Amino acid sequence: MSTRSPLLSLVALLAALALAPASAGASSPPTSPGVPPPGANDPSCRSTTHPEPVVLVHGTFEDMTTNWTELAPVLEASGYCVWALDYGNRGTGEIVQSAKTLKTFVAHVLAVTHAARVDIVGHSQGGMMPRWYIKFLGGAAHVDDVVGLAPSNHGTTNPLAPPLGQAGCVSCAEQTAGSPFLTRLNAGDETPGAVSYTQIETRYDEVVTPYTSAFLAGPAAQTTNVLVQDDCPADVSDHVGLAYDPIAAQWVLNALSRPGPADPAFRPSC
């Protein structure tokens, strides 16, 4: 019988998940932060069809290399200019500081591309953290869409999140349901600014618990909450796998291709 503590087991599991491909069809990605995923960070990219660059924001324990090996090339093939960044010591640092890193990166993308605004697609913390940038750091003027894949918008009730915070993952503690950080983020308007918000979640999310904590309260014209099993009940993607899920990718493309958030009447191919 193993004597490894539950905390160390979860740390090892999350590290393994972060460094492993999430689908049988994916090739093994590089494991070093700082390597853009395929199709991303080309400063010469311009799109007349999709003039707003798409910024990909990874999740906790992830980096742009591991999180976006499949979605980045899908977006590029669909005619989008794709950008990705690393932040916060693999997303474990203080979330406010990570939001400041995102602010700097978006300013760089806008300066390079001369675009008026960007779209943001984020996984887990990367779907939630941009809301701090929008709400408190002036991001509402620079962001058109935020699309979250299993975003930790209201945190998690997973009992191991606080111990991970004590073990050095500051953002893990901040993503605990009811934390001071999330209380401030979600006070008042959850969908501020002239920004469209799409949350895409899986019933089988074992990290953001309950899975409904991913969803946001907002006007229908501005906010769409998607549970992938509502249309595709056989989809068994978990928290990590949702970033690699072709059904979730269809929802991402729908959200980015139209004014406002994803169309609630959209029906993906299962």
Image (spheres, rainbow, N blue to C red):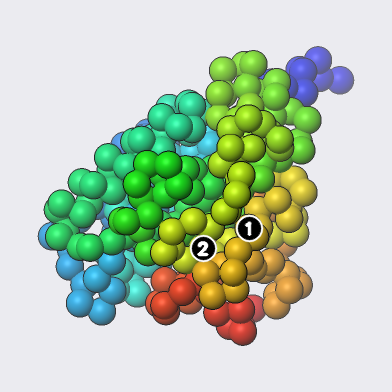
Quadrant occupied by the C terminus? bottom right
User: Where in the figure is residue 38, as x and y percent of width and height?
Assistant: 32, 55
Q: Give the residue at the far right of this rendering.
A: 1
Q: Which residue lies under the disc numbered 1?
A: 216
- Residue 197: give its label: 2
Q: Give the residue at the far front of this rendering.
A: 188
- Which of these two is toward me, 181 or 104? 181
User: Where in the figure is residue 253, as x and y percent of width and height?
Assistant: 45, 73
User: Where in the figure is residue 26, as x and y percent of width and height?
Assistant: 49, 56
Left/right of residue 156 with respect to residue 111 in the rendered view: right
Amino acid type of the residue that numbered disc 2 sits on in the rendered structure: Tyr
Q: How many marks?
A: 2
- Mark 1, Cα crowd under 10 Å, few <14 / some 14-19 / many 20+, is many
Indicate whether 120 appears above or below 250: above
Q: CA distance from mark 2 to mark 1?
A: 8 Å
Residue at 46% x, 74% y: name it: 260
Amino acid type of the residue that numbered disc 1 sits on in the rendered structure: Leu
Left/right of residue 245 with respect to residue 80 in the rendered view: right
- Which of these two is toward me, 22 or 148? 148
Ranked by sequence position, the earlier of labels 2 and 1 is 2
Indicate whether 152 appears above or below 195: above
Residue at 81% x, 19% y: name it: 2
- Which of these two is toward me, 5 or 45? 45
Q: Are marks 2 and 1 in contact (CB under 8 Å)?
A: yes
Quadrant occupied by the N terminus? top right
Residue at 54% x, 65% y: name it: 198
- Which of these two is toward me, 77 or 143? 143
Residue 48: quadrant of the picture: bottom left
